[in-house]
Amino acid sequence: MILKTYARVFTNDLAASLPLFQQLIGREPDVRFTYGEWEIVGIGDILLVAGTDEALAPIRGSYGPLIVDDLAATQLQLEQAGAVIVQPAAVGPTGTLLYARHPDGSTVEYLQFTPELVKQIIK
């Protein structure tokens, strides 16, 4: 089951991007962390992903993340529907994630938050 969706916004300058989203959404970020070469900020239903063009290139054409309650069950549903797992499940700073290419060709990130983030963000 999908618990939450994020619209991913790519930026090369997080310091210039974040204040506007804070003003538009009316609150401070829910989560902020570094993952590899990316600096990531979740605020409301927006996920700002900052980095160089080169660092962002591998995920720039993907969608998500879609936050799910059970990543293993989601993977099974995806595979049964004809999706191909293009990045197997891996642990990241906010939980366990994978990337799947849907039968229509779109690539989507699926993420199962840590229990702490479910309590903090999903409630």
Image: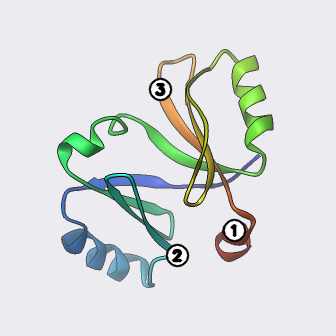
Please determine whether, in this image, residue 103 is positioned above or below residue 107.
Answer: above
- Residue under circle 1? 122
In this view of the protein, which residue sits in the foreground, 1 or 75?
75
Q: Which of marks 1 and 2 is nearer the N terminus?
A: 2
Q: Where is residue 10 in the image (x, y as percent from the top left)?
A: 29, 52
Q: In which quarter of the image is residue 114?
A: bottom right
Q: Residue at x 56, y 23 (%)?
A: 102
Left or right of residue 21, residue 11 in this image: left
Q: Distance between the residues labelled 1 and 3?
A: 26 Å
**Crowd class of label 2 (few under 14; some 14 to 19; many from 20; radius 10 Å):** some
Element under disc 1:
helix
Amino acid under label 2?
Asp
- Residue under circle 2? 30
Q: Which residue is drawn at 69% across and 68% down?
A: 122
Q: Distance between the residues labelled 2 and 3?
A: 27 Å
Element under disc 3:
loop
Q: Position of residue 82 (x, y in %)?
A: 66, 15
Amino acid under label 1?
Ile
Please determine whether, in this image, residue 117 is positioned above or below residue 97.
Answer: below
**Crowd class of label 3 (few under 14; some 14 to 19; many from 20; radius 10 Å):** few
Q: Do the residues labelled 1 and 3 touch (CB within 8 Å)?
A: no
Q: Residue at x 36, y 79 (%)?
A: 22
Color theme of the render: rainbow
- Residue under circle 3? 106
**Crowd class of label 1 (few under 14; some 14 to 19; many from 20; radius 10 Å):** few
Q: Where is residue 79 in the image (x, y as percent from the top left)?
A: 71, 20
Q: Which residue is drawn at 19% across and 64% down?
A: 13
Left or right of residue 2, residue 103 in this image: left
